[in-house]
Image: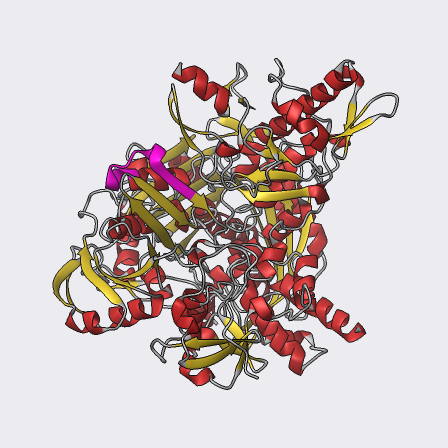
Amino acid sequence: MPDKPTRHAKPIPVPPVAASAREPTLPLRINGKAFFHNGDPEMPLLWYLRDVLRLTGTKFGCGVGYCGACTVLVDGKAQRACLTPVKTLSGHEVTTIEGLSGNADLHPLQQAWIEEDVAQCGYCQAGQIMAAADLLHSNPHPSDEDISKIPNLCRCGTYPRIRNAIKRAAEAMAKK
Amino acid sequence: MKTNLSRRRFLFVSAAASGALLVGWRLGGAQNLPYLGAREEAQALGPFIRIEKDGDVIIGARATEIGQGVKTSLPMLIAEELDVDWSRVRVEQLPYGYIETDKGPSNKYGDQGAGGSDNIPSAWTELRQAGATARALLMQAAANQWDTSAQNLRTSAGQVIAPDGRKLGYGDLVEAAAALDLPKEMPALKKPEQFKIIGKPTRTVDAADIVTGRAQFGIDAYLADALIAVILRCPHLDGGVDKLDDAETRKVPGVKDVFVIPGPNPDEPIDGPLAAGVVVVAENTWAALKGREKLKIEWKPGAWESESTSALAAKANELLDKDLDAVPVRKDGEFAKAYKAAATRLEARYEMPFLAHATMEPPGALVHIENDKALLIASLQTPSRASQTISNLTGIPRKDIEIRLTRAGGGFGRRLKNDFVAEATLIAAKTKGKPVKLIWTREDDLQHDFYRPFGMHAMRAALDKKKKVIAWSHRCAATPRNYRDSGMKDRPLYIGCIEPDDFPAGLVANLDKTFFPVASGMPRGWWRGPIHTFHAFAVQSFIDEIAIGTKQDAVQLRLDLLGAPRKLKYEGEDRFDTGRLAGVLKRAADTIGWKDKRNDGHGIGIACHFTFGGYCAHAFEVSVEGKNLLIHRAVCAVDVGRPINPLGIEAQMMGGTIDGISTALNLAITVKDGQVQQHNFPDYPLMHMAQAPQSVEVHIVESTEEPSGAGEIGIPSVAPALANAIYAATTVRVRKLPMMPELLRLL
């Protein structure tokens, strides 16, 4: 039985999901829930997430797929939401930072990010975590060189703590 | 009557006889704290503190959090003196606290801006007093209940404790405490040895919200019915809109309106929008961006069409060579005479590019104008000036302008300007009562910034036969930071480019600092550690050149210049402690192994600088392999006085170091034909993780001095230390930033 379109529940009060997200047009699965999009099928996922679903954890940084602030997972692989038209996503599962931990409180990466006190301004960190999630999924024991391949930009210069947090999360996941 | 009412209900900030700010208050009801996540039973003790019946403590964070960590460190000061368990503290962002007093506009929370690394120094006494006063009231409430004197009581972790061991939790006392009169005298503050929170490594209070995507930045603000606006701004400096064809734009589904907003009048202060442009208002961001793409505009060039970076460099050199338009900065002794007579003379010229701030979260603002009231939600650095901007543009009194503060996705000085607030206000004034959120793209951001100035530093030094520096000349030709800034109209032109009292002023008998303004249409602003990053590269590179040119040790030469520990005049006060600068220099040198010879192609370089009350030194070990610069070690020693949050200071030094490397190696804004040449990150390439050092070895000096801030302290010494290390590794002297293209040209 297909999921009914649901209203996304956020722990902080925001205006409700735009009505268009509940009209049966372009079907989308985001964080395990079904939504629809009836606007421009070329609309990038980034703006659908933010303007329509009010999932604002995915950030706008450059709009050209370079900085990685908008990184989400599509079928588990890191992808730039700013360059992904929603029309390409039917039949695919999108995971955003809000859905990364699934039913758990925190994903091991999120836990490690807190423990290493990675964030300064914090703006790029959701994208960094999503990129790291993709890395650890395909490579559970990444070397320093593997970690260095994450192309996401951090303007505050938190890279050393990002590196430490990924290693910490990899260790925690290996123990499970 | 009015006076009494405001005194009774609001915090007031008054200058004590000592000149220190005293924060006191009368009862503040819940209505004064609209954004603190209040449960009904929570009771306020002044503007910063609420205590719930169960003993949970909510502390209001007053400053704008731009990544410098003040949303954590400032509440730590309050919690320390309140004497509560930090794990029971919940921090909430306060809104902008504008109030009107008998003496004019004021702020019920004190200073809320972010600039000059000033938050910790300005809060150090004030916010501890706020905590101590609340604690005194709680103790008095307990004393009243137990019919004893408060002097007999002590507190620990959110409880008042009697000599016989009876205890009352703050949650049980807060209601009675809130009804008490303020203590007549400011309660004594804790002795440092009593600190339980100050000095303890403390994680960012918003960490959980940040990693789950819940944290709210300005760009994340949505209001029901809000429209989205984008602007296509004129790419010509001081240009305008000549012809507009918006027919195709208006056909884009979701586009609601298209109109022109004017830019600043040439030669007048830039207090509103930074550039003329065409606004597209739409139902969502995608429609707005698509509509903007379809605009057909003929631009009117401005008066700066011939401006280019190469012409600016030529002009700067000409001014320096011919000694034209000189603005004196500081003169000690007789430089010319000493220089002429000296045994050894050296000179070098250094070039600095324009820089953009490139905050990860681009500028933007959500504004709602409804009848005679306005609401602003945005990532800001100076909410006070944002409030003035809205009031100036709309005529709405400042008391009727509500400003909600969010985390900001970086600041670096960009948000000290409120041009984006002005734009959003002008747009919101046309959207018939609907809120409007203005979005800037990265292209907008890099093309329309208040850039760090461009300039040239001409350095000369003379040494006597004992190799002592006896004459120093620093002549700076630059596009003045002080440009079309109404807040700076009475300040000298050199402000923001060269600092009269900076090292080695006061340490060399014959000193000449002179400024040469270079005309330019590029808007200029403050950029993280502004004056300091701009001139420390020249000063600290040149010291290295002097050491090498006269076969002296580069660390010892600096130590000799600094001499015995003492305080030198800096901006009129005895502020610059030569001993503390020497201290961080020695610490960095010892850590990197300055005296250990490298013969594997590696080189080490060092530099130090005094910035906004803090002392920092950097040392790098590098090698150049092919076209790659490898940074093997990055060491940062810092003295910011008593460390409030060592984990936060370490973060700022690590971040400052990496920002410094990233900027020094590759970043420049250039101008050609009166237009900025860079568009997005591919041509303004911030450093990736792969290029960054794997770790930054941060050493924090234990100190009992008054604390300074940390946000800007860790960057000015980076670029010169890196250039000095590159020289040590390659014997190639890089005198022009950014370094990488110049190094590859010279190699």
Count of residue discs: 0
Image point (64%, 32%), residue name: B564
Between A77 and A55, which is closer to the camera in this rendering?
Answer: A55
Colour pattern of the rendering = secondary structure
Q: Position of residue B686 (x, y in %)?
A: 47, 65
**Residue B142 drawn above or below residue B682:** above
Looking at the rendering, the stretch of residues picked out in magenta corresponds to: B391-403
Q: Residue furthest bottom?
A: A91
Quadrant containing the N terminus of chain B in the rendered view = top left
Between B133 and B361, which is closer to the camera in this rendering?
Answer: B133
Image point (30%, 42%), residue name: B390
Q: Position of residue B461 (x, y in %)?
A: 46, 44
Q: Is residue B11 left or right of residue B207?
A: left
**Residue A176 drawn above or below residue B652:** below
Q: Position of residue B354 (x, y in %)?
A: 36, 56
Between B82 and B434, which is closer to the camera in this rendering?
Answer: B434
Image point (25%, 41%), residue name: B394
Residue B392 among those drawn in magenta: yes
Confirm whether residue B574 shows in the render.
yes
Q: Is residue B681 left or right of residue B283?
A: right
**Residue B248 drawn above or below residue B68:** below
> Quarter-wise, where is residue A143 in the image?
bottom right
Q: Residue furthest right?
A: B164
Q: Position of residue B519 (x, y in %)?
A: 24, 49
Between B132 and B70, which is closer to the camera in this rendering?
Answer: B132
Image point (68%, 63%), residue name: A105
**Residue B441 drawn above or below residue B334:** below
Confirm whether residue B674 shows in the render.
no
Residue A18 among those drawn in magenta: no
Q: Is residue B477 left or right of residue B178?
A: left
